[in-house]
Image (cartoon, rainbow, N blue to C red):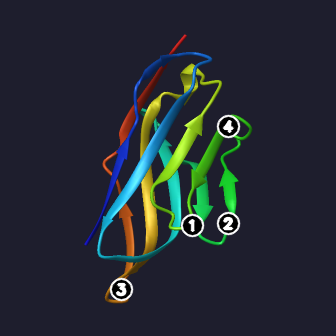
Amino acid sequence: QVHLVESGGDSVQAGGSLSLSCRASGSIFSIVAMDWYRQAPGKQRELVAAATSGGITEYGNSVRGRFTISRDSAMNPVYLHMNSLKPEDTAAYYCNARGYTDDDSVFDVWGQGTQVTVSS
């Protein structure tokens, strides 16, 4: 089995910065992609940032230019660096990872989430 653990969530003031990390553990052969999503109360989960082992990154429109996803060649851990935070960035942030296990099975797993609260 593969497990993801997010960390780094906190309460910050608007304009501040925060970095989240997502670390995978278990019988991992390779991680192909790791994404960050967020979900605010009463809203749908939305893609924040995505990264692939091939070097492709993409960002949601609302965070482009403020957030950066970074990772090493093993894609573990993956970080989300958040700058110029706004109150509307307040949400639970979730990590999703996809890849292959040691026994050649495909995995697609989610972490438990970490809370980011931005006050004005």
Task: Locate residue 42, reporting x and y percent.
Answer: 43, 34
Q: Is residue 57 left or right of residue 103?
A: right
The image's mark for residue 73 is 1
Q: What amino acid is at disc 4?
A: Ser
Distance from disc 3 to disc 4, alpha carbons, whole Å, reads: 35 Å
Q: Give the residue displayed 68% in from the left and 55% down from the top.
A: 58
Q: Tell which circle, 1 or 4, labels the residue nearer the N-terminal end.
A: 4
Distance from disc 3 to disc 2, alpha carbons, whole Å, reads: 23 Å
**Contact check, label 3 and label 2, Cβ < 8 Å:** no
* Label 2 residue SS: loop
Residue placed under numbered mark 3 in the picture: 105
Q: Is residue 19 above or below residue 48?
A: above
Task: Locate residue 4, reporting x and y percent.
Answer: 34, 57
* Rendered-image quadrant of the N terminus: bottom left
- Quarter holding residue 54: bottom right
- Marks 2 and 1: which is nearer the front? 1
Residue placed under numbered mark 4 in the picture: 62
Q: Tell which circle, 2 or 1, labels the residue nearer the N-terminal end.
A: 2
Task: Locate residue 66, reporting x and y percent.
Answer: 69, 34
Residue placed under numbered mark 2 in the picture: 55
**Residue 44 in sight:** no
- Marks 3 and 4: which is nearer the front? 3
Q: What amino acid is at disc 2?
A: Gly
- Marks 4 and 2: which is nearer the front? 2
